[in-house]
């Protein structure tokens, strides 16, 4: 997966978790929490969806790496490089 692919995955997950948010103006270098009304449970939902859809395990100590779109795609790119979506 490329960074663009990963960005689309994250946007898709965010759209599911926060359906009322306008993601079209999302800035890559600004923290999600500063742009969207996400709480701690929403953030955990993002992590769980990544695990469910792509079997990506993210240790709790790495959660700060998922603060913004730019840091999330950079963190996930090596983990998801050779992954395809898990069929449920």
Image (cartoon, rainbow, N blue to C red):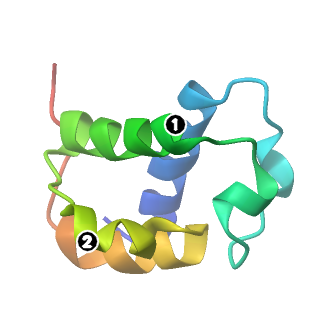
Q: Is residue 52 above or below residue 44?
A: above
Instruction: Identify the residue shown where x is 54% and y is 68%.
Output: 67
Q: Is residue 7 above or below residue 43?
A: below
Residue 81, label in figure: none
Instruction: Identify the residue shown where x is 42% and y is 60%.
Output: 6
The residue tagged 1 is 42
Report helix, strand or loop for mark 1.
helix
Q: Earlier in the sequence, mark 2 or mark 1?
A: 1
Residue 20, given in percent of the width and then of the height, sits at 78, 25
Residue 8, given in percent of the width and then of the height, sits at 53, 51
Few, some or many residues within 10 Å of mark 2 (<14, 14–19, 20+): few
Quadrant location of the N terminus in the rendered image: bottom left
Residue 61, label in figure: 2
Residue 12, given in percent of the width and then of the height, sits at 53, 38
Residue 35, given in percent of the width and then of the height, sits at 79, 56
Few, some or many residues within 10 Å of mark 1 (<14, 14–19, 20+): some
Classify residue 26 as left or right of residue 84: right
Quadrant location of the C terminus in the rendered image: top left
**Residue that extends furthest to the top in the rendered view of this protein:** 88
């Amino acid at each position: 997966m490329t960074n663009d692919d990963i960005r689309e995955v994250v946007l898709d997950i965010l759209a599911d978790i926060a359906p009322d948010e306008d993601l079209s103006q999302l800035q890559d270098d600004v923290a999600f929490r500063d742009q969207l009304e996400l709480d701690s449970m929403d953030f955990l939902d993002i992590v769980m969806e990544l695990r469910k859809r792509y079997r990506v395990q993210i240790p709790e100590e790495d959660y700060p790496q998922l603060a913004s779109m730019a840091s999330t795609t950079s963190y996930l790119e090596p983990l998801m490089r050779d992954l395809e979506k898990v069929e449920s």
